[in-house]
Image (spheres, rainbow, N blue to C red):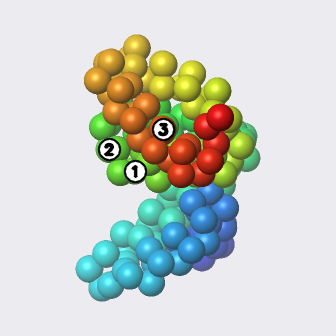
Amino acid sequence: MDKARFELGLNKRKATLGDDYVSQNLAKADAFNLPFQEAMTEWCWGFGWGDDTLDAKTRSLMNLTMIAALGKMHEWELHLRGAITNGVSVDEIRSAIHVIAIYCGVPQGVECFRIARDVLEELDLLT
């Protein structure tokens, strides 16, 4: 493991998903899944998110569309929260879901809107 890349990834992961979430996730890791947690933190967050060519907001919007296309809605909700942390506005979330519905299908767009409404209401971001 590249310790510097892991630390960069850990910082990027915490900045987007929240220190509590990431710390709890790593604390729950055991011999079975700890190597995956470490590799994912180093590779996805250190290598992928650690490159400053794209800003965090753009990466978050990209993640929302790709994760929706995969239909991984638990991860989509997690990354929606991260996107909000990274400055993605409610209007930008709506527009991203429109694109998701066009390219991934209306049922997927409906699912994204359902999850987004719950999260946005919880965070008191809907007027």
The dot on residue 117 is 3
Tell me what residue is drawn at x 53 percent, y 78 percent: 23
Left or right, 88 with respect to 45, comes to right
Circles 1, 2 touching at the beta carbon (< 8 Å)? yes
Q: Disc 1 designates what residue?
A: 75
Q: Is residue 98 above or below residue 36?
A: above
Q: Mark 1: which secondary structure?
A: helix
Q: Is residue 76 above or below residue 35?
A: above
Camera-nearest residue between 101 and 15: 101
Q: What kind of residue is marked 3? A: Arg
Total count of labels? 3
Camera-nearest residue between 90 and 5: 90
The crowd level at tag 1 (other Cα within 10 Å; few <14, some 14-19, many 20+) is: some
Q: What kind of residue is marked 1? A: Glu
Where's residue 120, x and y in %? 55, 43
Camera-nearest residue between 10 and 105: 105
* For discs 3 and 2, the disc positioned in front in the rendered view: 3
Tell me what residue is drawn at x 54 percent, y 34 percent: 62
* For discs 1 and 3, the disc positioned in front in the rendered view: 3
Regarding residue 23, the answer to whether it shows in the image is yes
Tell me which corner region of the image, top left, top right, bottom left or bottom right, holds residue 58. top right
Tell me what residue is drawn at x 34 percent, y 44 percent: 73
Left or right, 87 with respect to 81, comes to right
The dot on residue 72 is 2
